[in-house]
């Protein structure tokens, strides 16, 4: 017989920088990319009438554009420019599985789109995946600080070195570019990182505290 100290073991998942199943994550992003290219091909063949379904600021008819806008692009050049960061950032956001990926993307997609709808210039139409891409980037840049993960912070430094320059796109000035989409997508990415970290902390605090117990062996 003896005294054995009981322990409460945290079930909070470790902070990851790469997906646990990288091939599945890559195939998911490739499938998503094929969808975007298919939509653009259809749009080009039919005279680009789909582009009118983007976000029309402060128009009730343009409110549903929040859902459709990221799927639409103004030209092949527009889509090509978005494809590589879309693949890379989306793949990295899948580090904690498809469930968190969906939550993070939904927050960025909806909050970013609503920001565009509220602040965009009247009579304009906003389309493109750029807002989601900016949101994924800022999510990846700040999540390590919320999660207190050295590995995620290191990845953020690398990403900022390679891609940080695109964040200048949140500033107005370039004609024909939705800086509002970039800005509110980026802000929504920070919000998503905070929400995810808060949820993880709440789940961790719900675990029972360590206790000592006497067991007969």
Image (cartoon, grey):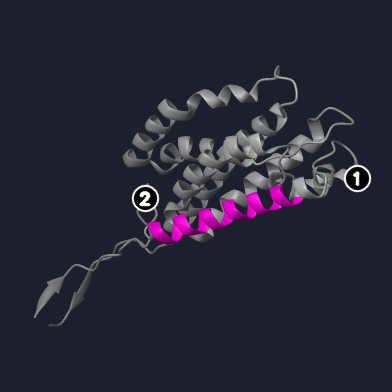
Tell me which secondary structure the magenta stretch mostly adopts. Answer: helix
Neighbour tally class for label 1: few under 14, some 14-19, many 20 plus, Cα within 10 Å? few
Q: Give the CA distance from mark 1 to mark 2.
A: 41 Å
Q: Is residue 26 visible?
A: yes
Left or right of 164 on screen, residue 41? right
Instruction: Give how far across and how far down residue 94 sits, in percent.
Output: 47, 53
Q: Which mark is residue 60?
A: 1
Locate residue 169: give its quadrant.
Answer: top right
Q: Is residue 16 or residue 168 the one in the foreground?
A: 168
Q: Which residue is mark 2?
A: 16
* Residue extending furthest toward the front: 45
Left or right of 45 on screen, residue 145? left
Using the image, determine if residue 71 lies above or below residue 156: below
Using the image, determine if residue 53 lies above or below residue 124: below
Left or right of 105 on screen, residue 75? right
Indicate yes or no whether the magenta region holds residue 200. no
The residue at 64%/48% (across/down) is: 107
Q: Quadrant of the C terminus?
A: bottom left
Q: Is residue 163 or residue 194 the one in the foreground?
A: 163
Using the image, determine if residue 128 lies above or below residue 93: above
The span picked out in magenta is 22-42
Instruction: Give how far across and how far down residue 117 sits, in percent.
Output: 80, 37
Q: Is residue 204 or residue 2 the one in the foreground?
A: 204
The residue at 56%/26% (across/down) is: 167
Whichever of callouts 1 and 2 sits on the residue coming sooner in the sequence is 2
Neighbour tally class for label 2: few under 14, some 14-19, many 20 plus, Cα within 10 Å? some
Of helix, strand and loop, which one carries label 1?
A: helix
Q: Is residue 205 visible?
A: no
Q: Is residue 149 or residue 57 the one in the foreground?
A: 57
* Residue extending furthest toward the top: 173
Instruction: Give how far across and how far down residue 200 sits, in percent.
Output: 47, 53
């Amino acid at each position: 017989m003896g005294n054995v100290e009981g322990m409460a073991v945290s079930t909070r998942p470790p902070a990851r920088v790469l997906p646990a199943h990288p091939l599945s994550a890559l195939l998911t992003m490739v499938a998503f990319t094929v969808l975007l290219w298919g939509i653009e091909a259809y749009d080009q063949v039919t005279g680009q009438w789909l582009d009118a379904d983007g976000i029309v600021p402060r128009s009730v008819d343009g409110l549903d554009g929040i859902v459709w806008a990221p799927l639409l692009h103004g030209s092949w050049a527009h889509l090509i420019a978005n494809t590589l960061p879309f693949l890379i950032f989306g793949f990295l956001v899948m580090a904690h599985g498809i469930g968190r990926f969906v939550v993070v993307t939904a927050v960025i997609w909806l909050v970013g789109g609503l920001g565009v709808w509220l602040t965009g210039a009247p009579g304009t139409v906003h389309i493109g995946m750029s807002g989601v891409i900016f949101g994924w980037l800022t999510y990846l840049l700040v999540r390590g600080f919320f999660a207190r993960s050295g590995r995620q912070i290191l990845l953020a430094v690398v990403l900022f070195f390679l891609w940080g320059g695109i964040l200048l796109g949140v500033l107005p000035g370039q004609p024909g570019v939705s800086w509002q989409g970039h800005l509110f997508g980026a802000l929504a990415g920070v919000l998503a990182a905070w929400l995810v970290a808060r949820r993880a902390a709440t789940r961790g605090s719900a675990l029972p505290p360590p206790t000592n117990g006497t067991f007969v062996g």
